[in-house]
Structures are given as C-alpha cells and as structure tokens.
Amino acid sequence: MEDPLDELIKEILKMMKRMQESMESELRELLGEDFNIRDLEELLSGEGTSGPGMRGPMFYGYYMTIGPDGKPVIKRFGNVLGGGRNVEEVGDEAPQREPMSEVMEFGDEYIAIVEMPGVSRSEIKVRVRGRELEVEGGPYRASIDLPGPVESGEVRATYKNGVLEVRLKKKRVGAHR
C-alpha cells in the first residue's frame, strides 16, 4: 500500500503541471502561437534583455484585507511601478521598482515592512508626509498610505537582510502640535 503522503504529493504535482499548461496556453492565446515559454524565462532571468537594469522578476497585483472598521481595504503590491506599465527607465539609470510592502497596526504604532534587497543602508531615505510614508533606496521607490495620522518626530527605521522596518508612533487623539 502506498503512503498517503506520497499520493498527496503526486496529486499536487499533477495539479501544478495542469496549472502550468493552462497558463502557457493562455499566454499563447494572448501573445500568439509562436510564443515560447523559454523566451519568457530568458526575459525574466535578465538574459538577453535590452536596456539598463531590465531584470526580473517583475510582478504586480492587488490584495484585500479587512480594515479596523470592518470594511474591506484593497491595496496593490508588486515591484513594478504603475501597474500595467513595465519598468520605468530614466536615461542610463536603473529602472525604478516598487518594493513589496505591508503596514501593520500594533498598539500605539504602525509598523511598515518594506523589502529592499541589495540596497545599502546609506542609500535608504524615509520621509513621512501627512498619512503617507515615502521610501527610496537603490532602484526602489514607494509611497505607502498609512492607516492614520502619525507623530512626525517619532519614526524609527531599521534595515537588516534586505528588509526595512519603519515604526511610526500613532498621533495621540486630542494632541496638538
């Protein structure tokens, strides 16, 4: 008798193969019959691309969470600015990418996590403008909406292993500055 875990793994692998075939079929439908998945793999790996810094992977999408008020909140994610566009090139400079980011609320602060691999700490700039956190560093640039107002003088940032963590103190209700 075969191990149930082995059977499950075989089923998962079959399902993944069907998904891959389906995606390749849809790409051929969109890009024409002479589309070859190897061409896409080559493009995303950065081999054979033209232009400075045109390296993959590039991705973009949306996700939904439930806000503290119980209402759905839809946000975008990805490392390519502008959604439908590809990478924004500026002369001979590397393209700008939007880093993966997430904002969480814990007690009296918001914590923003921003993935910026390969950037040196000295390149990173963090600014708060109203309810927006602006982050720049290397090829990455993002404007991140904050759930509420923050104390402008109480922002702490740490950067380790390609991950920037920004802690922002929530503005106290009734506080005037």
Image: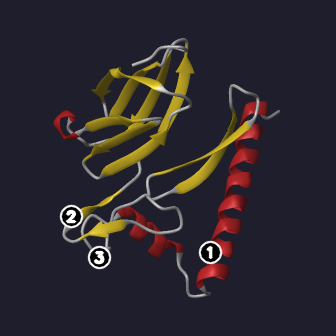
Q: How many angstroms separate mark 1 from mark 2 (CA)? A: 31 Å
Q: Farthest residue toward the right?
A: 1
Please report contact status of discs 1 and 3: CB closer than 8 Å, yes or no.
no
Cα gap from disc 2 to disc 3, whole angstroms: 13 Å
SS class of the residue under badge 2? strand
Q: Nearer the viewer, mark 1 or mark 3?
A: 3
Q: Mark 1 and mark 3: span between their CA atoms?
A: 22 Å
Q: Mark 3: which secondary structure?
A: loop
Which sits earlier in the primary sequence, circle 1 or circle 3? Answer: 1
Q: Is residue 116 visible?
A: no
The crowd level at tag 1 (other Cα within 10 Å; few <14, some 14-19, many 20+) is some
Residue that mark 3 sits on: 50
Name which residue lies at 76% across and 46% down. 11
In the rendered image, residue 68, in percent from the top left (x then y), is placed at 69, 25
10 Å neighbourhood of mark 3: few (<14), some, or many (≥20)?
few
In the rendered image of this protein, does residue 98 appear above or below residue 66?
below
Is residue 79 visible to the viewer in this orientation of the structure?
A: yes
Q: Who comes first in sequence, dot 1 or dot 2?
A: 1
Above or below for 155 versus 45: above
**Residue 27 locus on image (x, y percent):** 62, 74
Q: Amino acid at mark 2?
A: Glu
* Quadrant holding the C terminus: top left
Q: Quadrant of residue 10?
A: top right
Q: Which residue is mark 1?
A: 27
Answer with mark 2 or mark 3, whichever residue precedes in sequence: 3
Q: List the residue tagged with mark 2.
A: 93
Looking at this view, is 129 or 23 the one in front? 129
138 relative to 168, above or below:
below
